[in-house]
């Protein structure tokens, strides 16, 4: 046998039997181990699944319970959690506030109108004249102009909104102030209606037009401007630049109770008291359009913008217009109470400069700097009939104190022509009580 040969094993029954038993034992042990491994692995998987399910359902149940309890507690403290629900039919990509703005615009747009102002303007033609025609064939032609009839032309535009089903339209007075012009109302569905100016408010920048349409017109709901808050979301709609109908801009209430001097386009400057300031874009052509809240209710009438500033616009509170609308519905005209005095409100500076004994009130016959003015008391006015005099200081009207924030004009507008009111005045450092019957201010 070579040293490289392996030793041969004798083929006998003894060694072969032991090897067979050992092989069977190994197979049984392996089978048992495989079964136990599968059982343990299955148990682990089942444990993970059950833990996940119980964790999910337990978290949902207890989360809902605790959220409900926290909400109840906050509600008892008048604290409301912000909602996250999407209204029916809403787009999940749109935030709740955006959805409210879209709904408000859709609701209001059919009632917002454009107002087109037209006027008969002269047409001129050019011709040439030779001033030396009578002096021979020599000379030269001088161009001249002469009128050749008239032509109806668009001279302006504004906005408004429908306030009654029979066609009353509210707008600004400066939109409809030209008595020689013609006015056409263009509704959101493209229909045109000739409009008649029914009334112009003599004290406020408001006017009411009338259009005749077949069937009831969509009406905007008037809100309550007394409950406005700084930071509240508002929406302005109007005929921007007299060209882009029903343009929409969104902003917030930036201030309340502002006093501004508004004018432009050849109109005389007018002092507007108690107006709403907003950063919603108000552009030329927006005048007379509505300022809305998120419910689609009118809370203001867009009236002016600050020139040279960005996002500074103003609107007349709608509560000031409600009285005008009711007067036109009942009598066909707007009447405004009139006392008939020219005055300035007393300031700390005026008190110190003129050594006045009071720090508030309406000083009759004085200008803004305290200088005397010619106009003091209107002839035939309620003030003249009641015996008011130059340099009287009106302190109160019906017990309401006159201040820089609560002017005499603002207080008077709460009453009607013909109402009897009581004035507390200061004359020569002596307080007096005067009874006055308010007159009617002409347009």
Image: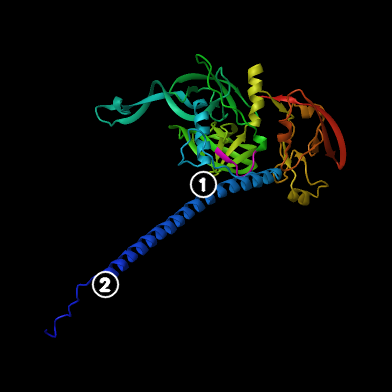
Quarter containing the C terminus: top right
Q: In the figure, is residue 226 to the left or right of 86?
A: right
Tell me the element at label 1: loop
Quarter of the view holding residue 433? top right
The percent position of residue 175, horizontal first and vertical second, equals 53, 29
Quarter of the view holding residue 206? top right
Question: Which residue carries the number 1 mark?
Answer: 310
Stretch of the chain drawn in magenta: 228-234
The percent position of residue 4, horizontal first and vertical second, equals 14, 83
What's the residue at 50%, 40% (across, down)?
98
The percent position of residue 247, horizontal first and vertical second, equals 46, 34
Closest to the observer, 230 or 100? 100
Q: Residues within 10 Å of mark 2 (few under 14, many from 20)?
A: few
Tally the marks. Answer: 2
Closest to the observer, 48 or 67? 48
Residue 443 seen by the camera: no
State which mark lies toward you, 1 or 2.
2
What's the residue at 86%, 41% (across, down)?
428
Question: Which residue carries the number 2 mark?
Answer: 14
Closest to the observer, 59 or 114? 59
């Amino acid at each position: 046998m070579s040293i490289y040969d392996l030793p041969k094993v004798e083929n006998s029954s003894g060694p072969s039997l032991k090897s067979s038993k050992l092989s069977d034992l190994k197979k049984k042990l392996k089978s048992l181990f495989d079964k136990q491994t599968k059982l343990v692995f299955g148990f682990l998987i089942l444990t993970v699944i059950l833990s996940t399910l119980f964790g999910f359902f337990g978290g949902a149940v207890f989360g809902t319970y605790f959220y409900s309890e926290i909400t109840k507690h906050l509600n008892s403290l008048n604290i409301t959690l912000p909602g996250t629900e999407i209204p029916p039919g809403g787009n999940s990509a749109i935030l709740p506030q955006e959805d409210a703005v879209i709904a408000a615009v859709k609701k209001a747009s059919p009632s917002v109108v454009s107002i087109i102002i037209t006027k008969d303007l002269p047409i001129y033609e050019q011709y040439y004249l030779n001033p030396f025609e009578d002096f021979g064939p020599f000379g030269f032609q001088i161009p001249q102009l002469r009128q050749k009839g008239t032509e109806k032309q668009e001279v302006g535009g504004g906005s408004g909104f429908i306030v009654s089903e029979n066609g009353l339209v509210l707008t600004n007075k400066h939109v409809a102030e030209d008595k020689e012009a013609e006015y056409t109302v263009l509704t959101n569905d493209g229909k045109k209606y000739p409009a008649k100016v029914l009334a112009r408010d003599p004290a406020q920048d408001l006017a009411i037009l009338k259009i005749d349409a077949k069937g009831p017109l969509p009406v905007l709901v008037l809100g309550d401007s007394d409950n406005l808050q700084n930071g509240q979301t508002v929406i302005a709609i109007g005929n921007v630049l007299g060209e882009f109908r029903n343009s929409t801009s969104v902003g917030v209430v930036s201030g309340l109770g502002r006093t501004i001097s508004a004018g432009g386009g050849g109109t005389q400057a007018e002092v507007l008291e108690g107006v709403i300031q907003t950063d919603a874009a108000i552009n030329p052509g927006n005048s007379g359009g509505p300022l809305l809240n998120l419910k689609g209710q009118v809370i203001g009438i867009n009236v002016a913008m600050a020139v040279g500033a960005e996002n500074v616009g103003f609107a007349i509170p709608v509560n000031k217009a409600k009285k005008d609308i009711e007067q036109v519905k009942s009598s066909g005209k707007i009447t405004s109470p009139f006392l008939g005095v020219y005055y300035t409100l007393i300031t700390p500076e005026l008190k110190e400069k003129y050594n006045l004994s009071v720090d508030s009130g309406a000083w009759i016959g004085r200008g803004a700097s305290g200088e005397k003015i010619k106009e003091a008391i209107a002839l035939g006015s309620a003030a003249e009939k009641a015996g008011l005099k130059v340099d009287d200081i009106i302190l109160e009207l019906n017990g309401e104190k006159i201040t820089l924030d609560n002017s005499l004009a603002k207080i008077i507008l709460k009453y009607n022509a013909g109402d009897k009111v009581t004035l507390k005045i200061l004359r020569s450092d002596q307080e007096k009580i005067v009874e006055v019957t308010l007159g009617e201010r002409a347009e």
